[in-house]
Amino acid sequence: MLTDLAAWLATQAGLRFAVGAGLAAVIAAGAWASRALSAGGALGAVLVGTLVFGGGGPIWAVLLILFFLTSSAASRWHADLKAAPAARFAKGSRRDLGQVLANGAVPAVLAMLALRFPEAALFAAFAGALAAATADTWATEIGLLSDSPPALITTGEPVPRGTSGGVTVVGTLAAVAGAALIGGVAAALFGVRELLEVGVVDVRLIDWSALRLLPIVAASGLASTVVDSTLGATLQATYRAHGASPGAVTERARDADGRPNALVRGWRWLNNDAVNLVATGIGAAMAWLLYAGL
């Protein structure tokens, strides 16, 4: 068995997975040391990073790293000012295994499919999933800094900061920027993929049709945030706390003392991680359909 593993690692595909595992381990270790990831989150990041690099290749991995770095930076930006409203979230800013897989499972599966179906539409779907994750993270983290209170996306009713389904103008603009960033970088990377493969600077090798990835991926990511917020305002499990902040609406099923909070809205099984998984799936599906249709 070890001989077979060694022989496989010597192949091009095996080498790519090995390199991906090494790079993912280094990045995950740094993120764990800086408290951006929990131990479980770091293991999840290694798994996702290995599958993305091994299945999709370097340009897929660059897009994944871009999502992770910018999202981590958004979480840390003015973290002290966001501490109080962020306490309503089910989890803290240190991402655990569930959060990593909620944002990374769909991209990882798509990257693995690229081993069997190396189609451009799969890369578009991959970018759409990451645009969804990026837009949602930026909208949440930057939206918490808005001077104006958020409004529930379904009714327009003002709600406290950190409430699931609450949206702000600042958060919406951040979502647009995040989705556009992923779309723009995806278009650039895919357009010059042949240049990167051959290592020769030749304008004739640029695939200018890749520019259509920008609006497709950006639109898919932005649309998914609307779905994310709508689910957050309707079907996502929301509880009423009775511990440190009695009466406050929260995503936490239990208070810090371990006592269960009362469910006031939504389905217990549909937590924030599940909503994010649905949103990335929708972002991927929409981008794939738009790219294949165009």
Image (cartoon, rainbow, N blue to C red):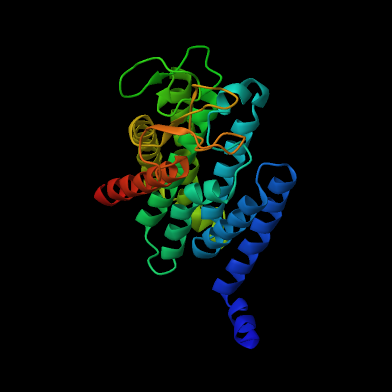
Examine the rendering and report whether any part of residue 180 can be seen. Answer: no
- Asked if residue 36 lies left or right of residue 140, the reply is right
Q: Quadrant of residue 245?
A: top right
Left or right: 11 with respect to 221? right
Q: Is residue 104 visible?
A: yes
- Residue 222 image position (x, y, % from top left): 38, 34
Q: Position of residue 163 (x, y in %)?
A: 46, 25
The vertical placement of 244 against 68, above or below, is above
**Is 149 displayed left or right of 9 in the figure?**
left
Q: Residue placed at 58% from the left, 55% from the top?
A: 44
Q: Nearer the viewer, residue 119 or 245?
A: 245
Find residue 255 and report its image quarter. Answer: top right
As drawn, 215 above or below 105: above
Name the residue: 55% across, 42% down.
67
For residue 239, which quarter of the picture?
Answer: top left
- In the image, residue 211 lies at what x, y percent? 40, 42
- At horizontal 55% and vertical 54% (from top left) the residue drawn is 61
